[in-house]
Image: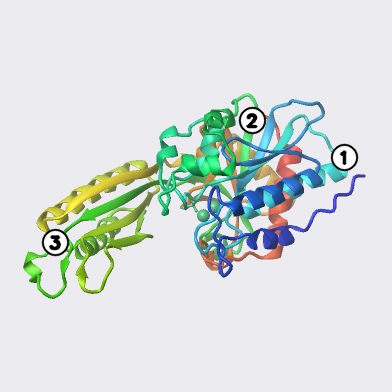
Amino acid sequence: MMNNNLPSITEMIEALALISEDKNLLTRRYLTSQHKKVNELVAEWMSVAGMKAWQDPIGNIVGRYEGHENGLPALMLGSHLDTVVNAGKYDGMLGVVTAIHCVASLERQGKRLPFAVEVIGFADEEGTRFKSTYLGSKAVAGTFDLDTLDRLDSDEISMKEALDKFGLNTENIPNAARKKSEISAYLELHIEQGPVLEENNLAAGIVTEIAGATRLTIEIIGKAGHAGTVPLHLRQDALVTASECIVKLEKIAKASANTVVTVGEISIKPGASNVIPGHAKFTVDLRSSENSIRKKVENELQQALQEICTNRKAKLITTKTHSAESTKCSNNVIKQLENAFVKSGYPTYFLPSGAGHDTAAMSDLTETGMIFLRCRDGISHNPAESVKMEDVEAGFQIMLKFIENFQPL
Ligand code: HGY
Ligand code: MN
Ligand code: MN
């Protein structure tokens, strides 16, 4: 029996949490040196677990454990390795390291299945650096938009330049796409990032669908001026205009069912206490369970913001940086997940995901499913994110049971 000396899931989580762009908090964005370091570490763990590991043309890290013969279609498991700013240490990473441990268990048992098993650590799910999400999973699914290469980060570095610097050739990105015949299904384990499982005193749940999302960047161009000399009624104050817009966004979302809107980033220029802001820029993250509601709200937002800007003699520039339809998980995978829950002795509980996940992008390529794990107080995108050890064990047992009983679709 092969024995692989892998660190525990908890030790892996802690090791990954130390690889950050900021020594005081966890931030790991796409195509940074920290991304490179994490890929190297995860590739090492994949090899110890008995997989062949490689980095694909968009910067995902992939491991493959062959079936009872080489070259069989694969059950792909995974999640993302990038983070938001000041992140928790489980969002994404827990799904990748749990999958590695499942393969290590197959290796220890000397088990070879009628399909291969692949584990993928997606390079950019959050979109923290270039504002467009699912870059890694879209490349694998063959839906990556090459226009994204022109996107600039906050240092005005384009994604293309960042890829070149990382050592990846943008001409190669289309080769990251996998064929439908190669991947039988994709399964992602992820923390719920909400309070539902905890409220129902459950360790884990089965995801039925993933909410759609729209991300916008709003620019408001007013007129900079002297804080002491320009009377209020003659001002074109970009920040006051933005503030009125943001309050209006919340009002419109509150009036629409199952809809949330978030302004997570805002910046103004020139940024001096005695200068009327001439330029304001903020992000809008709009989610709704129904695509039709999200699109209706998006139109309402645009009209309302235009009206406010016209009244205040400001110019409005709206850029859509991301749009994802709400996605249903595959009934076949849900059924097999249900069996895995029962066989592992856990009650089955179905719930939708308000958060976006690579699973949504992978649904364009193959059948998909998700296992949610309870997280304390539903906290996520926050360093206070945490899970119970017994729930991590539950996730591992359920995922392993799913793999061992998986019927290629
Ligand atoms: O924003 C989200 O829903 C996910 O965490 N990227
Ligand atoms: Mn996240
Ligand atoms: Mn995530």
Disc assigned to residue 236: 3
Instruction: Provide the residue designation for mark 2.
Output: 183
> Where is residue 70 drawn, in percent x and y?
78, 26
User: Badge 1 is on which residue?
Assistant: 110
What amino acid is at disc 1? Gly
- Left or right: 53, with 107 as reference point: left
Earlier residue among tags 3 and 2: 2
In the figure, is residue 284 to the left or right of 194?
Answer: left
Q: How far, Cα to Cα, is label 1 from label 3? A: 70 Å
Nearest the viewer among 213 and 340 is 213
What is the x, y in percent for residue 103?
77, 44
Q: Residue at x 30, y 43 (%)?
A: 295
Neighbours of disc 2 within 10 Å: few (<14), some (14-19), many (20+): many
Among the 4 quarters of the image, the one containing residue 2: top right
Q: Quadrant of residue 89?
A: bottom right
Percent from the top left, x then y, of residue 48? 81, 47
**Position of residue 76 measured from the top left corner of the image (x, y, whole percent):** 66, 37
Residue kind at label 3, given as amino acid type: Gln
Direction right: furthest residue: 1
The residue shown at (73%, 47%) is 100
Q: Secondary structure at mark 1?
A: loop
Describe residue 74's horizontal placement relative to residue 167 as left or right: right
In what element is the residue under mark 2? strand
In this orientation, which residue lies closer to the viewer: 310 or 333? Answer: 310
Q: Which mark is residue 403?
A: none
Residue ID at (84%, 38%): 111
Q: Which image quarter is the C terminus in?
A: top right
Mark 1–mark 2 distance (CA, rounded to whole Å): 22 Å
In this rendering, which labeled residue sits more in front, label 3 or label 2?
3
Instruction: Judge left or right: residue 135 versus residue 341.
Output: left
Q: Nearer the viewer, residue 326 or 16?
A: 16
